[in-house]
Image (tube, rainbow, N blue to C red):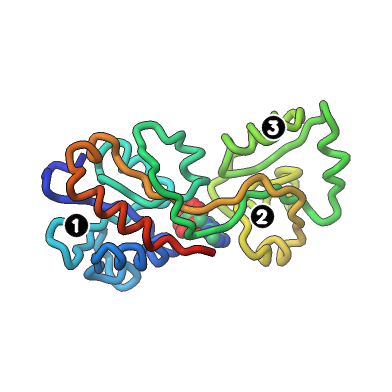
Amino acid sequence: MTQDASLITLALSKGRIFDETLPLLKAAGIEVAEDPEKSRKLILGTNRPDVRVVLVRATDVPTYVQYGGADLGVAGKDVLLEHGGQGLYQPLDLNIARCRMSVAVRDDFDYAAAVKQGSRIRVATKYTTVARQHFADKGVHVDLIKLYGSMELAPLTGLADAIVDLVSTGSTLKANHLVEVEHIMPIASRLVVNQAALKLKRATLRPLIDAFATAIPKE
Ligand code: ATP
Ligand code: MG
């Protein structure tokens, strides 16, 4: 929990999560004072003296909230699955920053043959926990190669047979001669709350969570 018991700290990542969280904040009567794309500040004030926003990497949001560097935050299901969710209360699926987790291969690669029961496949991904589970469920042995970005390059350079990555329109895959061969799961962002903060700052946090709930986009 952040030090000052009357102060609420919300962790967001720049880009789509920040942008798509703004309407939810607005529904709770909160307006962020600055545009993160135009400022180098990492702590942004709001119209409410008791609420501030901290900007962190998308993958760091669960960590900040888990250890109380922030009271709450917004993180992708992809990020939460890799983090594990320890110490986090996840009251809402916010239905924002939607995409899917998929397996993709080179368009000339015979994926069906490569994933026959008992076979072995080399998979590059940022999402090793999800990928390991997915191939274990299929009974396929997997050699995982951890990457932090530009996953599309792995099958093109021979680093891996397949990738597990997030897909929204599929245009990045297409531009790199890759095809989506399996949908693993749909992905959206969730509200995560520090469990101790929820108890100690409940009077402020509960109305905020309820206001977010009313503003979740339908489709
Ligand atoms: P960076 O791009 O700075 O390396 P990142 O990829 O973790 O960081 P974003 O690209 O902003 O950060 O993604 C944040 C979250 O948005 C992801 O964790 C995922 O849940 C979701 N997301 C990622 N890519 C897409 C996409 N193409 N369409 C919709 N949502 C996406
Ligand atoms: Mg990204």
Residue 31 picture quarter: bottom left
Horizontal side of residue 81 vs 75, given as left or right:
right
Locate residue 37, reporting x and y percent: 35, 70
Ligand 1 is within 8 Å of the C-beta of the residue at disc 1: no
Ligand 1 is within 8 Å of the C-beta of the residue at disc 3: no
Q: Residues within 10 Å of mark 1 (few under 14, many from 20)?
A: some
User: Mark 1 and mark 2: span between their CA atoms?
Assistant: 39 Å
Report the residue marked by disc 2: 152
In the image, what residue type sits under mark 2?
A: Glu
In front: label 3 or label 1: 1
What residue lies at 84% left-to-right and 38% top-to-bottom?
114
Name the disc covering residue 143, or none.
Answer: 3
Judged from the image, the secondary structure of the residue bearing numbered disc 2 is: loop
Residue 90 picture quarter: top left
Q: Is 127 above or below relative to 53?
A: above
In front: label 1 or label 2: 1
Taking depth in this image into account, of 54 and 8 the one nearest to the observer is 8
Locate residue 129, reporting x and y percent: 57, 35
Q: Quadrant of the N terminus?
A: top left
Report the residue marked by disc 1: 51
What residue lies at 51% left-to-right and 53% top-to-bottom?
188
Q: Are marks 1 and 2 in contact (CB under 8 Å)?
A: no
The tag earlier along the polypeptide, 1 or 2, is: 1
In the image, what residue type sits under mark 3?
A: Asp
User: Mark 2 and mark 3: span between their CA atoms?
Assistant: 17 Å
Judged from the image, the secondary structure of the residue bearing numbered disc 1 is: strand
